[in-house]
Image: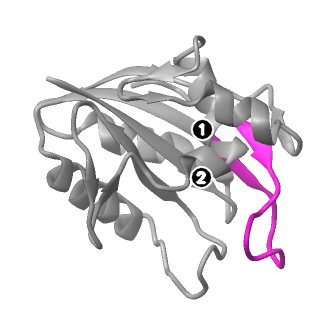
Amino acid sequence: MSTVVLGLGSNLGDKRKNLNMAVHALSLLPDTKITAVSGIYQTKPVGYDEQDDFLNAAVCIETNLSPHAILGACLGIEASMGRVRLHKNGPRTIDIDVLIYESYFSDSFELSLPHPRIKERAFVMVPMLDLFPSGRAPGLYFLPYLREIGTDGVVKTDLDILIP
């Protein structure tokens, strides 16, 4: 089994429900178990400002699925939940990013791991800190990057994700 860290975000419709539906769908993947879920954070949009705030979270899973199979599953969940890609960094019902796949490193057009923008995004690293309080995830020590960019605009909510 490999440890995989996923980032989730939603800013359309019932955002909390979207996060819960995505986590439930992830729990149904074969040979996959959810091991931890972060709190839910409200964040400002990045890259395309003409949209509502996001709710973001991070999920840690253990899986026997390959990195490409996990990517395909995440894209399938997004599509099944109505994700439409009209603008880069635009509004979305759900976004599921494969952030880290333990002991797997790739820099291809299809799949770059660890995710190339983790170190630039507090809205990714702050939820990851819930999962890895030391700031050290499998294959990535992200705490120095978070300290460098700060946590402005990332606010923990009192909402929780329901783990199936």
| Residue 25 among those drawn in magenta | no
| Residue 52 among those drawn in magenta | yes
Q: Which kind of residue does numbered mark 1 sit on?
A: Ala
Identify the residue shown where x is 63% and y is 31%.
Answer: 127
**Looking at this view, is 28 or 53 the one in front?**
53
- Judge left or right: residue 40 versus residue 4: right
Query: Circles 2 and 1: CB distance less than 8 Å?
Result: yes
Residue 62 location, x and y as percent?
A: 24, 25
What is the secondary structure assignment of the residue under circle 2?
A: strand
**Looking at this view, is 116 or 32 the one in front?**
116
Query: Dot 1 corresponds to which residue?
Result: 57
Q: Is residue 137 above or below residue 110?
A: above
Location of residue 156 (image quadrant)? top right
- Judge left or right: residue 65 versus residue 20: left
Query: Dot 2 corresponds to which residue?
Result: 9
Q: Which kind of residue does numbered mark 2 sit on?
A: Gly
Q: Which residues are magenta?
A: 40-56
Label 2, label 1: how far apart the Cα atoms are = 7 Å
Identify the residue shown where x is 29% and y is 73%.
Answer: 109
Q: Quadrant of the C terminus?
A: top left
